[in-house]
Amino acid sequence: MTNPFSLTGRVALVTGSTTGLGKPMAIALGKAGAKVALNFNNNVPRAEAAFAEFKAAGCAGMLVRGDVSSETDVPRIVAEIAAQLGPVDILVLNATPDQPQKPIEEYEWAFYQQMLDFFVKSPVLLSKACLPHMKQQRWGRIINIGSEVVARGVPNFTAYVAAKAGQNGFNRGLATEVARWGVTVNMICPGWIPVERHANDPQEQKDGYRALIPADRWGVPADVAGAVVFLASEAASFVTAQNLHVNGGMTVH
């Protein structure tokens, strides 16, 4: 029988994939058979170390540098991937900036704009760049990485929550627009899954969140990576316009 989770022959782009949750997503897609472009914009040594780890896991792909919120960088990124690996079949929109929590009075509009650039502008630019190929072959996967914060209404986080809500709206609207071409568009909403950038977060904050998780354990990056592989696969070909919460039961609808 054909493996419905095999991604052999597919090309994937995972934005912001040399650290955090993005790196295990890229590795999981590579292990499933896809050729994967790992994207980064800064920190060349970290990117090269991540790509070495990716190759050591038996995966094939490339590193591609560029700002995924830039109207000039995005077409170049997609063209470079097409030239080296082939056109993008699977687009995972994961890149994120720092996310400080502050009362609304302490946020400047420029920070809101940065959040919107990462979580609305970047998905729009990348989707527009990748959709012509997906529509032509009548197969494609666009996977937005969202957050549980929209459902939970996390306080002192209005810029991030608002931008992620905007990404959610984009996800839903685009899904119904492109469904007839065999392109699915879904969103994965992780809970708080500690990665490198959480190393210095207050322990009492971590303990407080951990105590609320119904599954009685921390989520790990592999939990999100597995959901990415599922949504990218043939097994999810009739799943679109959905929000998949990967958070051990923290949000119940």
Image: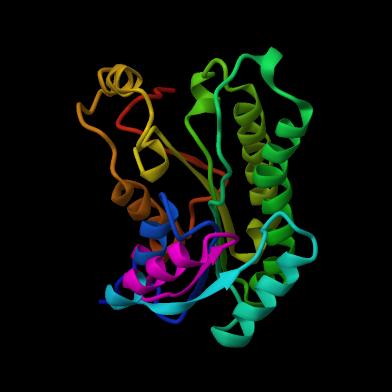
Horizontal arrangement in the rendering, residue 245 relative to residue 167 (left or right): left
Q: Residue furthest left?
A: 216
State the image coordinates of residue 152 (x, y, percent, origin top left).
49, 20
Question: In the rendering, at what x and y percent does residue 61 appear?
Answer: 45, 78
Q: Based on the displayed image, in which of its 4 quarters is residue 119 positioned?
A: top right
Q: Residue at x 58, y 22 (%)?
A: 157
On screen, residue 108 above or below 62:
above
Residue in the picture at 56% in, 46% down: 96
Q: Quadrant of the N terminus?
A: bottom left
Residue 99: say if magenta.
no
Q: How many marks?
A: 0
Residue 164, horizontal then vertical, whole percent: 61, 35
Front in this rendered view, residue 127 or 101: 101
Q: Residue at x 57, y 17 (%)?
A: 156
- When the figure is inspected, residue 185 is found, relative to residue 29, above or below; the finding is above
Residue found at x 53% / y 51%: 94
Q: Which residues are magenta?
A: 28-53
Residue 165 % position (x, y): 63, 32
Q: Is residue 245 visible?
A: yes
Quadrant location, the C terminus:
top left
Residue 6 seen by the camera: no
Q: Give the left or right position of residue 159, taking residue 149 as reference.
A: right
Does residue 250 appear to the left or right of 130 in the view shown?
left
